[in-house]
Image (cartoon, helix red, strand yellow):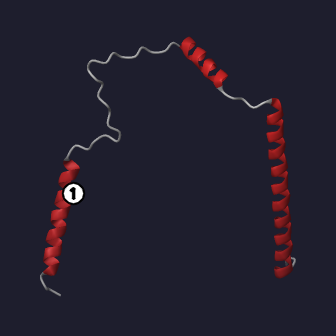
């Protein structure tokens, strides 16, 4: 029971706890440290809303939009896939429902 090792373990734990407490008292760094602005760099002026809209429109013109035919084809693929998966899940649900009724009976 009293081998002396227990006292050392308690002392070691106390030292560890003291170290952790000391670390906790130190200043914690922010979650995301801020970058200091370089002293000689000028600040960028804010973009006006009208200029922002103009730039957005210019970028949207660069987008490779799908044609009406492609959109129709993609829509058809999605609809057919949804119907097929729905029918498959409905079939599984019906089959397992009948199986449960067969195994456990039709209720009391």
Q: Count the labels in the image.
A: 1
Q: Is residue 13 above or below residue 50?
A: below
Viewer-side residue, 106 vs 36 = 36
Viewer-side residue, 32 vs 71 = 71
Secondary structure, mark 1, is: helix
Q: Is residue 36 left or right of residue 92?
A: left
Q: Is residue 25 left or right of residue 59?
A: left
x, y (%) of residue 71?
Answer: 79, 35
Quarter holding the N terminus?
bottom left
Q: Residues within 10 Å of mark 1 (few under 14, many from 20)?
A: few
Which image quadrant is residue 102 in? bottom right
x, y (%) of residue 23?
Answer: 20, 52
Q: Which residue is mark 1?
A: 20
x, y (%) of residue 25?
Answer: 20, 48
x, y (%) of residue 85?
Answer: 81, 56
Q: Is residue 87 above or below residue 69?
A: below
Viewer-side residue, 95 vs 79 = 79
Viewer-side residue, 40 vs 52 = 40
Residue at horizontal 83%, vertical 36%? 72
Quarter holding the C terminus?
bottom right
Residue at horizontal 33%, vertical 15%? 42
């Amino acid at each position: 029971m009293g081998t002396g090792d227990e006292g050392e373990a308690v002392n070691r734990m106390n030292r560890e706890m003291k170290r952790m407490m000391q670390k906790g008292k130190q200043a914690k760094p922010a979650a995301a440290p801020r970058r200091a602005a370089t002293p000689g760099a000028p600040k960028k002026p804010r973009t006006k809303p009208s200029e922002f809209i103009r730039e957005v429109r210019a970028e949207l013109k660069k987008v490779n939009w799908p044609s009406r035919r492609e959109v129709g084809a993609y829509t058809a693929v999605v609809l057919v896939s949804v119907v097929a998966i729905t029918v498959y899940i409905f079939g599984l649900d019906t089959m397992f429902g009948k199986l449960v009724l067969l195994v456990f009976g039709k209720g009391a």
